[in-house]
Image: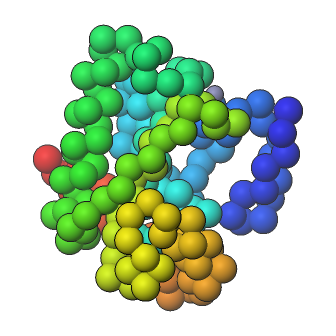
Amino acid sequence: MRTITLSNGTTVEVECLSCALTSGRIEADGGVILETDYFHAHQDVAYPIKGLIIVASKRHIKSFDEFTEAEKVDYMSVLTRLRKAQRQALQIEHVYYFYNEDTTHHFHTWMVPRYDWMYEFGRSVESVRPVLRYARDEMKDTKHVNEVMNAIQLVKAHIHHE
Ligand SMILES: [Zn+2]
């Protein structure tokens, strides 16, 4: 078991944070953005960045090569639906995608939007950690958090009106 502190300050004991989120045992702030038979998408609330979405598998697996045929198809569909919503609802022009197989949770992909303010931290992959840290430490005020919550609603509305 691992103890995880949620953004609202409460702590939970979980075997796997991804399992807790995809099963609904824990609800991310802003709720479920998109859920299919195989995947679950929510805002990464640790970082107040509009449209920063995590797509987690429902099965406790670590890696692409464990996907079933149905998961392969559904994964691409989920990513492209979310990407379209990011573009059309939030005007996000570029997104970086990350997934690491040595995670302590299970399979999840980060969809990290690029905003103009991020370029002062550099370009490409080396800028991502400083950008996330900056957002976590400097953008946790009500204004930014409200913007993030509003962005979640815009993305959800887009998804539900496809
Ligand atoms: Zn899991």
Who is closer to the viewer here, 130 or 36?
130
**Ligand 1 lies in which image quarter?**
top right
Q: Is residue 118 placed above or below 28 in the rendered structure?
A: below
Q: Quadrant of residue 120?
A: bottom left
The residue most toward the top is 69
Side of 63 relative to 60 (left or right): left
Rendered location of residue 157, percent (x, y): 25, 58
Rendered location of residue 124, percent (x, y): 38, 64
Q: Is residue 16 placed above or below 152 in the rendered structure?
A: above
Quadrant, the N terminus = top right
Q: How many marks?
A: 0
Who is closer to the viewer here, 6 or 108?
108
Side of 150 relative to 99 (left or right): left
Residue drawn 79% across and 49% down? 4
Q: Judge whether residue 89 can be spotted in this image.
A: no
Who is closer to the viewer here, 61 or 6?
61
Side of 44 relative to 51 (left or right): right
Rendered location of residue 75, percent (x, y): 32, 30
Residue drawn 26% across and 32% down? 76
Residue drawn 22% across and 44% down? 81
Rendered location of residue 6, percent (x, y): 72, 57
Who is closer to the viewer here, 69 or 81?
69
